[in-house]
Image (cartoon, helix red, strand yellow):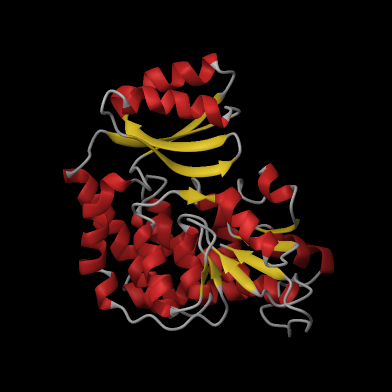
Amino acid sequence: MGPTGFADIERFATEVPVAWRLFAEADEALGYQVLDRFRQTEGDYSEYAQVAFLVTCLALAEWAEQEALPARPGLCTGPSFGGKAAAAYVGSLSFADAVWMTARLARCVADYFSREHRSLVTHSFVRVKPEVAEELLGELIARDRVADVACRVDRDFFMVTLSADDLPGLEKGIRAAGGLSLYTMRPPMHSPAFAGLRRRAEKEVLDELEFAEPRLPVISDHDGSLLTTAEQVRNLLLDGFVRQMHWPGTVEALRARGVRTVCVAGPDALFSRVPATARNFEVVPVGPKRPLLVAAARGAEPRSSRGAESGAERGSAAG
């Protein structure tokens, strides 16, 4: 999940039948109108932005199966925030429970970081060799500073959780190495320092939910392992607070299991484009504009149902 503005999904959410159906179900699950609150609330990662992202990913995945894919996906993965969408897509959580969980976790995270680790941020940067990145972080670790790789997006693309006080020095090192700083995220993410948040999220949110066996296997975005039980999917969501997201390892695991085509379902400007994905797969990006463009090309209203074509399980859906 990257910064997603209301305008990016407004038309899709109100004009594509599968989308407005799921947004209506989300409204019912939460007792408020998600799109209205998303439009009115500032912040890239507000509760309402996160719920809207979840619903949009799931609506796009359903639309893709009906309209865009030559076969039903045989594996699923959900990098970082996408893990919540993955849990719902594979049926480990009902749609209503996934929506409720997303809203409650967003509140839990916001409250936690209003009290704990208030100086920490997660900074993303690219075009820095792994050995150079390791050296930059090693300098901070040697001074007993927090410097954790939150996300490994590609060979030279990192997201690092550290103190905002240490960010100017890191950015200087990134520039000196010929790299480019991209975005600084608040709240921070994916660090062993957040063990307290993991415990709180389990007690206050996930303990209230019943997880089911997934209808298709999930590839962990932490270590590429194959997850086939309800408990494994549950732990995947909790471990996301404290473990690094490793996309190259996820890609390697998908390739090792025979995947050659991936459908990236969601508002995405990252995972469908990075070389780790583009070099290894035929990529079918399905974002909010895709259903509208398809409908326009047909000269008809967007359709919400058509039987998915049968065939070998050859794809992977990434929310």
Residue appearing at x 27%, y 49% in the figure: 194
Residue appearing at x 42%, y 22% in the figure: 170
Determine whether 116 is above or below 15 in the image: above
Determine whether 75 is above or below 79 in the image: below
Specify whether 56 is left or right of 261: left
| Image quadrant where residue 240 sits | bottom left
**Which of the two residues, 4 or 319, is positioned nearer the viewer here?**
319
Residue appearing at x 33%, y 72% in the figure: 30
Q: Residue furthest right?
A: 298
Residue appearing at x 25%, y 74% in the figure: 207
**Which of the two residues, 193 or 206, is positioned nearer the viewer here?**
193
**Which of the two residues, 47 or 7, is positioned nearer the viewer here?**
47
Specify whether 269 is left or right of 91: right
Determine whether 25 is above or below 204 in the image: below
Residue 289 position in % (x across, y down): 67, 57
Quadrant occupied by the C terminus: bottom right
Specify whether 104 is left or right of 158: left
Residue 56 position in % (x across, y down): 54, 64
| Image quadrant where residue 32 sits | bottom left
Residue 315 position in % (x across, y down): 71, 69
Specify whether 60 is left or right of 294: left
Q: Is residue 271 visible?
A: yes
How many numbered dots are placed on residues in this image? 0
Q: Is residue 33 visible?
A: no
**Which of the two residues, 162 or 228, is positioned nearer the viewer here?**
228
| Image quadrant where residue 256 sits | bottom right
